[in-house]
């Protein structure tokens, strides 16, 4: 919920308030609880104001994912390549885990709602584009890191997809504490997974 009054006429600030409200609702109540009225209440504005920025909650959800994808892309662009492949993966994993914590359980509901409403265009296309940008940023970071370490990556277009899916799977386990049930510490699981990924994507 917004704690400060955004100045009148500050359109970008108002949009940030709306998205911050939506993200909090999504985290606490999931996609089902994400309504335009609830978003408006959390942002301290009228429902009409929210509709000035977004046509519906599907658009809001897409904007939230875009914002988090942008964050991931910036992190991948700036991460120190000198850390090595394992180090880079460990640096990025907390952001992936946070991404999955916020959107994992809601993404399938969002996509089903958009597709069932025949709105495949803007929202799904935009989300797919954000995802592809993140995969390209991931591929670039891994390639440059490997080169700096004197390693060579496996030449396969599936590589960034597989790495991303592995990081998401790891994030899911960390959030559900599956490994901890079997007395495997989170840091141990992350280290093992990142080293396994390195072995899987680099040539011997």
Image (cartoon, rainbow, N blue to C red):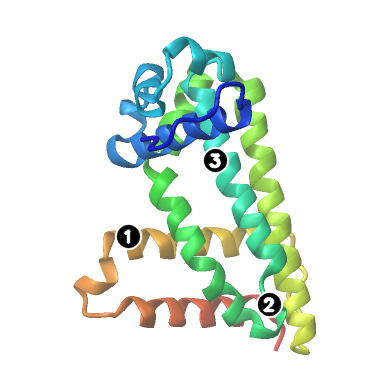
Give percent across and percent down for residue 59.
55, 24
2 and 3 marks in contact (CB < 8 Å): no
Identify the secondary structure beneath mark 1: helix
Identify the secondary structure beneath mark 3: helix
Dot 3, crowdedness within 10 Å: few (<14), some or many (≥20)?
many
1 and 2 marks in contact (CB < 8 Å): no
Q: Is residue 148 above or below residue 131?
A: below
- Which image quadrant: the C terminus? bottom right
The residue at which mark 3 appears reads as 65
**Which is more N-terminal, label 3 or label 1?**
3
Residue at image x 41%, y 27%?
43
Total residue callouts: 3
- Residue placed most toward the observer, 107 or 203: 107
Q: Determine the CA span between mark 2 and mark 3.
A: 25 Å
Identify the secondary structure beneath mark 2: loop
Q: Determine the CA span between mark 1 and mark 2.
A: 26 Å
The residue at which mark 2 appears reads as 80
1 and 3 marks in contact (CB < 8 Å): no
On screen, residue 71 versus residue 47, left or right, reads: right
Give percent across and percent down for residue 105.
37, 42
The residue at which mark 1 appears reads as 175
**Which is more N-terminal, label 2 or label 1?**
2
Q: Nearer the viewer, mark 1 or mark 3?
A: 3
Residue at image x 38%, y 38%?
3
- Residue placed most toward the observer, 111 or 44: 44
């Amino acid at each position: 919920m917004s704690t400060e009054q955004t100045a009148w006429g500050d359109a970008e600030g108002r949009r940030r308030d709306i998205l911050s409200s939506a993200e909090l609702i999504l985290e606490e109540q999931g996609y089902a609880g994400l309504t335009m009225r609830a978003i408006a209440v959390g942002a301290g504005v009228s429902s009409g104001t929210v509709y000035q920025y977004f046509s519906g909650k599907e658009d809001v959800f897409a904007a939230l994912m875009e914002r988090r994808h942008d964050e991931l892309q910036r992190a991948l662009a700036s991460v120190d390549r000198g850390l090595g492949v394992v180090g880079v993966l460990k640096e990025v994993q907390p952001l992936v885990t946070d991404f999955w914590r916020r959107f994992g359980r809601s993404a399938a509901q969002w996509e089903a709602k958009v597709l069932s409403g025949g709105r495949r265009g803007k929202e799904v296309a935009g989300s797919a584009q954000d995802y592809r940008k993140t995969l390209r940023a991931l591929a670039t970071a891994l390639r440059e890191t490997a080169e700096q370490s004197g390693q060579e990556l496996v030449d396969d277009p599936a590589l960034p997809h597989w790495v991303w899916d592995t990081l998401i799977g790891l994030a899911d386990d960390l959030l559900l504490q599956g490994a901890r049930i079997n007395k495997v510490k989170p840091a141990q699981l992350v280290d093992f997974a990142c080293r396994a990924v390195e072995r899987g994507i680099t040539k011997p």
